[in-house]
Amino acid sequence: MQNAGLGALGLNWRYLAFEVAAEDLAAALGGAKAMGLIGLNLTVPHKLAAVGMMDVLDESARQWGGVNTVRFEGREAGGAWRPLGEWTDTPREVRAHGFNTDAGAVARALREDLGLSLAGASILVLGAGGAGRTAALKLASEKAARLFLVNRTRSKAEALAREIQGRYPQAQTAIGYPSGPVELVLNATSLGLRPGEPSPLDEGQFCLRRAAAVYDMIYRPAETELLRSARAAGCRAANGLGMLLYQGAEALELWTGRTAPTAIMREALEENVYGATRAGH
């Protein structure tokens, strides 16, 4: 996805993946800075730990409490900081600037992939961990009217409800399944990643026919048990590929200062994740 985007922009850059142990994150970030990397992405379990390792945090990282995108910047003689991608030489002083592009990607995917209006919506969120927390807070900030939080550990859902009430008091929160209809069911758990895993939704407590749309953050497999059930119930449904695309596109724009070629990036992403001849594409 990112290399396709870089190619379309005509940039002689390369996006590579590296596995880094949690205890080595600080050393890896320091090495990336020393080697003059333009920037990088972080995924689980590094997003929260990286917050305290940045030289400066964007408002997005402060607001959502996690860093998934780092942009390295050099300091000019006059004191101003510019992204390393704009430099032709090597600056003497470099800093790590942390951003969060996950939250915006969730909202964009729900709007573009499901045609959903978030303001005033009633939403059931499955999972209150890292991804669920970010999604729920973003939905509350987008003026969702009611958020129903379901998590395997009830105390974590209660803690998230308190955080939402403290930051976005206009959004009503409740723990557990709703008794009435909702505009959206959003899965932020990992249930469905492995073949044969059950749906994270307890349909004994909530019938999918009462949901207008279902979004599963999982994108591989393309159709989880939850999404199969959602389509059978007549719901609009989408997987997490759009969220993956949009967070990556925003990261690319932060590094390059240019508009990301999202159509080309989506095509490359779908080919990599599903294969060029996936049914329905």
Image (spheres, grey):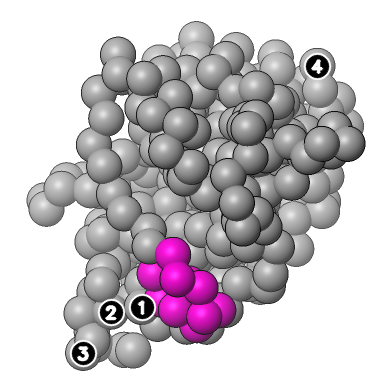
In depth, the one of 62 and 278 nearer the eye is: 62
How many residues crowd mark 4 within 10 Å: few (<14), some (14–19), many (20+)? few
In space, the residues marked 1 and 4 are separated at their CA atoms by 41 Å
In space, the residues marked 1 and 2 are separated at their CA atoms by 5 Å
What residue lies at 54% left-to-right and 18% top-to-bottom? 53
How many residues crowd mark 2 within 10 Å: few (<14), some (14–19), many (20+)? some
The residue under label 2 is: 271
Of the numbered discs 2 and 4, the one sitting upstream in the chain is: 4
The residue under label 3 is: 277
Q: Which residues are magenta?
A: 3-13
In space, the residues marked 3 and 4 are separated at their CA atoms by 48 Å
Secondary element under disc 4, as helix, strand or loop, is helix
Query: In the image, what residue type sits under mark 3?
Result: Thr
What residue lies at 63% left-to-right and 40% top-to-bottom? 91
- Counting from the top left corner in percent of width and height, residue 36 is at 48, 42
The residue under label 4 is: 166
Quarter of the rendering containing residue 26: top left
Query: In the image, what residue type sits under mark 1?
Result: Ala
Of the numbered discs 1 and 4, the one sitting upstream in the chain is: 4
Query: In the image, what residue type sits under mark 2?
Result: Glu
In space, the residues marked 3 and 2 are separated at their CA atoms by 8 Å
Looking at the image, residue 144 sits to the left or right of residue 190; the answer is: right
Q: Is residue 12 magenta?
A: yes
From this viewpoint, is residue 3 visible? yes
From this viewpoint, is residue 157 visible? no
Secondary element under disc 1, as helix, strand or loop, is helix
